[in-house]
Every structure is written in C-alpha cells, then in structure tokens.
Amino acid sequence: FGGVVKEPPMHIVHVAVEMAPIAKVGGLGDIVTSLSRAVQDMNHNVDIILPKYDCLNYNNVKDLQFHKSYSWGGTEIKVWLGKVEGLSVYFLEPQNGLFWVGCIYGRANDAERFGFFCHAALEFLLQSGFHPDIIHCHDWSSAPVSWLFKEHYVHYGLSKTRVVFTIHNLEFGANLIEKAMEYSDKATTVSPTYSQEVSRHPSVAPHLYKFHGILNGIDPDIWDPYNDKFIPISYTSENVVEGKRASKEALQKKVGLKVADMPLVGIITRLTHQKGIHLIKHAIWRTLERNGQVVLLGSAPDPRIQNEFVHLANQLHSTHNDRARLCLTYDEPLSHLIYAGADFILVPSIFEPCGLTQLTAMRYGSIPIVRKTGGLYDTVFDVDHDKERAEAKGLEPNGFNFDGADAPGVDYALDRAFSAWYDGREWFNSLCKRVMEQDWSWNRPALDYLELYHAARK
Ligand code: ADP
C-alpha cells in the first residue's frame, strides 16, 4: 500500500440512511460511522449525507446549523450541517415531510422516500459545486444513487466521480441491489466468505469482476472498555478478569438476576429469521440446563415474533427468574454492559454477511460462540478445530463455532464452551485476554477500501 498512502487525499461522500449513534437500526449504521472515521483518520476528506429524520438522536449531533436550502422535486429542501463522532454530516430535510414520520424504516413508501432522498443528495452535491472522488452508497436504501448518478449527473461537472456500492445484506431489496450492482463502478460486500456465498446470486454473478469482500471493522474508540460510561470500571486486557467481574455483577443487578459466579451467555440481536431464532431459543434452555445465566437483548420488527418472545419471557421469568432475562427492546447502554459482563456472546445466525456483535464481544473480552457462516466464519476460529486456519491469518483461535442449524449444532459449541468455563478457569481467563488483544478495528480493512477507491478512479 506504500504508493497509495503518498497520493493526495481523496474526497469521499457517503449517501446513507443509517448512521450510528444518531440513526442506527443495525450494523449498517455502525459501519457508515466507523468506516468514515477510519478513512478520515488516514487523512482523507469524508462527508456523509443523511436524511434529517424527526427521530434523530440529536444529543449526539454537535454544532448543528442551517447550511442552505434548495428547491428540487417539487419541494424546498433545507440542508443542515452538524458533527457526529467528529464527522461532517449534511442532513437533508425535504419540506414535504417525507422524513417526519417518527421512524427510519417501516412505512409503506420507504422505497419512494429513500429514492427521493438519493436523488436529492445528488442534486445537493451538484448545486453545491462538490466534486467528490467517490460517492459510496449502501444497500437497497441508497442503491438508487448509482443509476441516478450515471443517468442524470455524471455529465454535469461530476465526471471524475466514481460510485462504490456496498451490499450489507442481500436479503432486502434485491431488485434495487441488482441495478446498483450493474451501475456502480466497484461493489463490495462485508466479508470474504459472504462474497463467496452470494457469488452465484443472479444480482451478483454477472458482476464478480468488480465485486470484493472486505471485512467490516469496529470502531475501537466507540467500543472501548477502558473508556465506556456504561460499565462500572475501566479495563484492558491487563485487568480483564477484574473488569469483567465488576461488569457481570453490575449487569446481574441491573437486569435483576442472581448475583453469582456463573457462566453468563449474552445475546444482542435483531430477532429475525436471519439470526437463528429457533437456535436462540434452544440455547437459552440449554444454558439453563448447564446451570448458566442468560441475558438476551433484542427486538423483533415482526410483531408475531415479538409476541413469541414476550410469551417466552413470561415463561422464563416465572420458572428461572434468577437466571434468565429477556429484554425485548433496543437499548444501547445495556448492550455495552452485556458485552462487558457476559462470558460468552452467542451468534447462531442462519446467514450473516459480517456480523459485528462477535467483534464487539471480543473487544470486551467476551468469547464468541457462532455458527460458521459468512463473516462469522471469517472472524471466529474454534479453539479445538481452527488452529491452522487462524494461524494462516496470523491469529490464535478465539472462540467456539458450529455448523448445523439445529439443536445438536448449538449444543456442540455451547457444551464445549461451558466445560471450558467450569473446568479450566485459568485457561478461560487467558482466552478472554487473548481475544481482547486481537485487532478487529478498521486498521486493515480501511486500507482495503482505500485501495478499492483508488482502483475505481483508474
Ligand atoms: P445486523 O446489522 O444484521 O442487525 P450486526 O451484527 O451487523 O447485525 O449489527 C448489529 C448492531 O446492532 C450491533 O452494533 C449490536 O450491538 C446492535 N444491536 C442489535 N440489537 C440491539 C438491541 N436490541 N439493543 C442495542 N443494540 C443492538
């Protein structure tokens, strides 16, 4: 990468509909923020264009000010500029009220709302005289940027701009993704294994020549057990045992579990089919059988699934009130305490483009237990089976994994994890220290993105 580093800074504009921590629904929001910060730290110029939702978490926007307004699409669009996690964000507020609906997703006209936003974002770039090197768009929600740009803007002073499109999840909006795959100059997805898994998909297969799997990273400043206001004491890998003991106790108190030295399994997830709902339920019961504790933090967009879990919560809270707690909501502060206080973080996904929770778990010294799919396969190396595969990446094994999407599969990994905890605490503690010392930040993947951005401009 030597040559890359010496070249002049690039200007990269992300057009996105999620951004942590002000408008986050899932991993996409984390990545827009953390990738941008990593690339900005490498001395490139990064801007983000986001809808100005009425439901933004404004506490985390600094210096918000009116920037300009323009007319487009039959309405006035007010543009606000603010700082989020040190990044410049342009907020587009169409006065037709498309983003005054109290939520990010979930309206019948989501595709129309985001389509309007994408077009308005390009119009903003044009009218402001921006000439970015790269416009980076994400998933179905900002996919239209790629063809709107090529159809309407590339000839208007933006001819040196290239469009990069990232698939965070191929499950949603495949027709929009297919079109973006066609129109973008480069396309990526969020892990090497997921890129292989989707390579025969009809929207991906024709475009493999410009398609790359680049692993996501996590932002080590946003997720930092040494500097985290949601956990009781600061810790690093040097005092991981003490730090996690205090966090476990705080977690047990906070959610009302028995304060005791027991293996604690944490699960932090959207509750959807993708995340392995039946495996999650099975793992809860198995954990209780093995005399462990379990805390699940999750919410279901589908009310039927939410109801199922409300039912399960009622049942568990009456039979195992001191050892199981299901928190069926979205709660950022509680997620931090679970990452820090759990011994294990379970991620039994049916498919998983990258997955961030296993990476965040390791940052907090929790041991990931995952199903071998997508990015989970690329980041978790089984202590019993993956020594060589880990070594090939310059790593030591860091967790437990399993293949089958069924109860025996989960049990195979969970049982070994519990045995390790019960029978070899010293070894287990050294594993916690080891995973904390692995680097799952953007240090490496951001360089891959920079190389891709450069290649797009050739
Ligand atoms: P996905 O994008 O498919 O939801 P990822 O693992 O890529 O899955 O990202 C999930 C992100 O959302 C993580 O940062 C995780 O901590 C967070 N998260 C998921 N569910 C919740 C919840 N109920 N409360 C707080 N944070 C959550």
Image: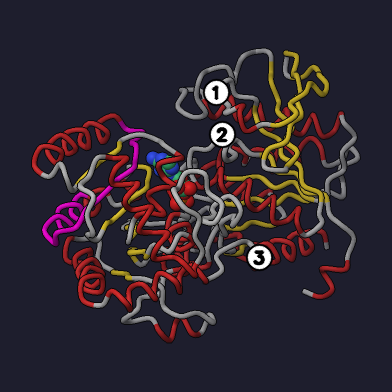
Real-space Cα separation, disc 3 to disc 2, in angstroms: 24 Å
Q: Which residues are magenta?
A: 281-302
Give the image location of residue 336, x and y in percent: 44, 47
Quarter occupied by residue 151? top right
- What's the residue type where badge 2 is placed? Ala
User: In the shown orientation, is residue 190 left or right of residue 303?
Assistant: right
Depth check: give the residue in front, 143 or 94: 94
Identify which residue is drawn at 60% across, 24% down.
53
* Mark 2 burial class by Cα count in 10 Å: few <14, some 14-19, many 20+: many
Label located before the other in sequence (2 or 1): 2
User: In the shown orientation, is residue 305 left or right of residue 147?
Assistant: left
Q: Which residue is mark 3?
A: 443
| Figure disc tally | 3
Q: Is residue 381 magenta?
A: no
Give the image location of residue 113, x and y in percent: 59, 25
Q: Which residue is mark 1?
A: 55
Identify which residue is drawn at 73% across, 42% down.
87
Verify CB contact (< 8 Å) between mark 2 and mark 1.
yes
Q: Residue 266: give its label.
A: none
User: In the shown orientation, is residue 321 left or right of residue 368?
Assistant: left
Label located before the other in sequence (3 or 2): 2
* Mark 3 burial class by Cα count in 10 Å: few <14, some 14-19, many 20+: some
- What's the residue type where badge 1 is placed? Cys
The C terminus appears in which quarter of the rendering? Answer: bottom right
Q: Which residue is mark 2?
A: 23
Q: Is residue 288 magenta?
A: yes
- What's the residue type where badge 3 is placed? Asn
